[in-house]
Amino acid sequence: MGTMTWTRMRRAVAARGFAPATWIPAASEGRAEEATIQPARLLEDLPLSGRAVGPAEPWPGVVAFLDGVQRYEVMAYADSTPLVVAEIGAAVLERRERRLRLALAERRRLVIARPQVLARLEGTTEGHETIALPDEGPVHPVRDFQLARRAVDQARGRLEVEVGRRYRNRSDAWLIVDGPLTESPQWACDPRMLGVSKSHATLPFGGEELDHYLRLAPGHRSPVFEPAGHAVTPVYSWGLRLWPWEGRDVLHGLVRIEAAPTLETLAQADQLSRWLLAERAPVSTPDPRWDRLLYGIHAVEQYLRASAER
Amino acid sequence: MSPAAPPIGRVVATELKPSTPHQFHFWTARESPIGIGAIVRVEAPGRTVLGIVTDGFAYSDLVTPIHDVIGADGDPASALEAPTERAEIRLYTAAVLRQLPEEPLQPVPLGAVHLATDEDVVTALRMDAFTQSAEPTGIPCGVYAAGGLEAPVYLDADFLLGPEAAHLNITGVSGLATKTSAVEFLLASIFQTFPAQKGTVAALCFNVKGPDLLFLDQPGALTEEDRRLYARLGLRAEPFRNVRYYAPYKPDGVNLNTLRTHEALAATTVPLVWGLREVQDYTEDLHNRDDVDAKAGAFIDFLAERVVGREFRDVTLADAPLTVRSFADLEDFFRRIFDFMESQGRSSEVWRNHHLATIRKVRNRLGNISVRAKGLVTDDGVASDLPWGTFADRSVHVIDVAGLDPLVQDLVFARVVSKLREHLERRDLGVDHVVVFVDELNKYAPNDGPDTYVRRMLLDLSERGRYLGLVLFSAQQFRSQVMRRVVGNAGTTVFGRMDLDELALPGYATLSPATKAKLAALPKGELMIRHPHFTQPLFVRFPRPAVLPGRVGVERFPPAVDLPFAQAVVRQLRALDPEIPPSRVEQAIHGRREEDVRRALHTTRRVRPENVLAFFTSQLGRRVEREAVPPRSVPALKRSDDPYG
């Protein structure tokens, strides 16, 4: 028997006395982040209002884009305990001669619940990995769901790291990752990887410095800094304004770049920024994050979503 | 290509674009060789579907154009420099040609799409039914070429030349649609591949403009590609072997009214000359109601039944029986009637129940034919006609009517097609099937305009000809301007490059926009074919016909200049016997009446005697020397003694 579809699984668990549910949480594919300021250490003697990086330049040679997606839902309840199913995927699209082609893709299906619930599912979870939630404390469906969501996030992150590692084993092309490089120590020290963070929940500066940072002009970058709190996976980082923000939002078009913590990164920050500026086109509409979402990353997401099993 | 070749696409079906039993959609890679008109095969468990691509779409993930403008900072040059090409889709719509199994007929399933193989093309176009049977009836009409595949396409003789269906109509703009070339190629293909069990076949072509069809017996220049296509279709690249040309004389009665008058081609160019007997049955049909009313019609019937070609006795006209065999005899007949009526004075205006005015009207109308058709219609009654009853298998007969008055063209059409029908009905034409090719059909069978005899005749031919083996191949620029029933009866319809305005008419509504666009830009040598076995129109390529194009033929064989009467007679006699000294001919005809010379010449051409000059001279008859009459002296009335003289 192959992978059990969720429809069949839903029938199977209902047959075992579970109460069916079809709750698909809103924004189930987003990552929960806590808004915070973690002051960074500046590595360049530049004003925080940044400097122009110069005109955009096309990226030379082959470039690859890595991203992952996830979706999950509460499939059923065993009494009050939720049974969560999830699908995660990660892929690398490689760009050669301006065209993106699939280089690597990996998918997993997960079943997440408390151990005693998982025990009752025996024989119904072919093709799925099971993740047991902590069994401490009384059953609380909302808390259990939050724990399940965190487990999915972590599994997706691990899968991205795994796919990134496999790609790196076969290619030394530049690899651009959606999000921070701090997910993995290997990524953090890879001299040919860049992380492009769209999220600014964690800001590197406060006060007047933050005002300057958030008001970077288009085509300008901030000084390179070392984000705080990454002792295991130190990286160098800088802010880059891709699109004008005036009249919109201070975060519009602002991305934070992460790269290996090396002198070479310091020396290349302008060049890398010019290459990234060229990635503004084509714009990744209709995604609402088009001002910060590189088209290559958008294409990976599109691929993963379009090819997801139903 | 082997059946195991990888798929080139996949069927997609959405709520907005669902698959149906007659249509489906599939996507392909951008580099796919698929194009409009390509045949594809859908493989799904338990079902194979063959379809032909009728439309194509490409779009990217761009939602609105403004996003592209934003991405390029408003500079089109920057748009070209975007480091990544947008994702782009190639989506095609295909019309179902055939489903296997054919029952139950179901919507096309989701499945892999493959380029068609040779065998697929045969199956898709249902050619297996007539090319792989015990008695195959396939006639090559071109090659289907798409995606690196080149497969011969066959028409079913039973549906092209009857009896199941028949007739072929071809439409396309002048000069680019290669209509004449297509018909010439197809005729050659028919002549080479028409199955023996179906009997014999000949072709009769009306050359209606310029030198179009005047060199079918001369080899034309072919490219290597043309020869390769001939070989692919299993045909020999050669001109027609047995062609005869017919052209009336010019009004002078000795120079032929055709562009095929080069000395080297004279042997196969035959004068077309008809006498009163040949045209009398068609005179009424050539005039409309204003010309010939019921009374005039009755008198024409009287002439046909009682007078022409018979001994007519009427003491009021002559003591001896009258014999009317020629227009000259007929004119004499009329003159006798008028003399008789005049002798009767004003008291009588009726002769044998026919009013004098009616008789005069008929005389005028018939006389008008002999005047307007001078060169075709002879006064002396000696005819030179097509070989009725002895049409040879695979022979081509070209009648050049290009230089004729429209009324005379109508006369030629009317008589020739009527004679074909008569002989085919009696099964004594010499062949079982005749293909009649008429170009400029919109002129002879227009959608609007008067209901002429020629139009009725073409309609009758298109509706009933197939039972007789009389097949109409017709061509025109604008199908919409041709009588619908005539083109509608064509079992096989061919389209060359089309005019966009014509394609915008409702008659082409069944064609997809992409098919119309392809038709409007179709290169020379490509055609779209509809045939009863093909459930959808198909694009094919065909090689140039292996005959000399008219334009080139006229350059290579320039028409002989019109000669003075005596020299024209010499040329015609020397065409029969090149050894004849011109001086002998000139000497023989010196001082003769031109009508006597013409009569002798026509008889000589018709008989083709061994000793041409002797026969010709004998036909001129005894020379009647002019007698010099001395002036008579008349005595003067005046006398010398006249005192007033």
Image (cartoon, coloured by chain):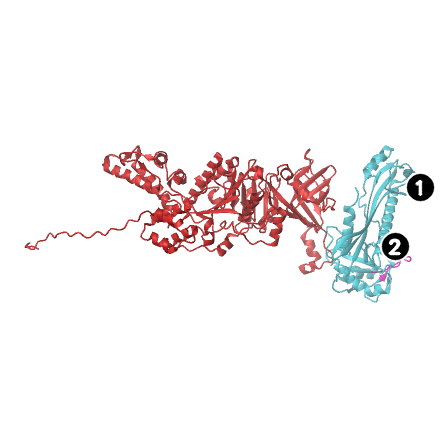
Q: Is residue B127 left or right of residue A99?
A: left
**Going from the N terminus, do you reach mark 2 or mark 1 first?**
1
**Figure check: B388 above or below A245:** above
| Residue A226 is a magenta residue | yes
Residue ID at (62%, 53%): B225
- Report the predominant secondary structure element of the magenta stretch: loop
First to last magenta residue range = A225-237
Give how far across and how far down residue B308 sits, in percent: 35, 37
Give how far across and how far down residue B27 sits, in percent: 70, 46
| Circle 1 crowding by C-alpha within 10 Å: few under 14, some 14–19, many from 20 | few
Nearest-to-viewer mark from 2 and 1: 2
Q: Is residue B525 left or right of residue A96?
A: left
Q: CA distance from mark 2 to mark 1?
A: 32 Å
Residue ID at (88%, 56%): A186
Q: Give the quadrant of residue A201.
A: bottom right
Chain A's colour is cyan
**Figure check: A183 above or below A5:** below
- As helix, strand or loop, the secondary structure at mark 1 comes to loop
| Residue B445 is a magenta residue | no
Q: Please tell me which residue lies in front, B524 or A12.
A: B524
Q: Chain of mark 2?
A: A
Type of amino acid at the residue the image marks with label 2: Ser
The chain letter of the red chain reads B
- The residue that mark 1 highlights is A137
CB-based contact (under 8 Å), mark 2 and mark 1: no
Type of amino acid at the residue the image marks with label 1: Gly
Q: Chain of mark 1?
A: A
| Circle 2 crowding by C-alpha within 10 Å: few under 14, some 14–19, many from 20 | some
On residue A184, the disc is 2
State which quarter of the image contains the C terminus of chain B. bottom left
Give how far across and how far down residue A177 sits, in percent: 82, 55
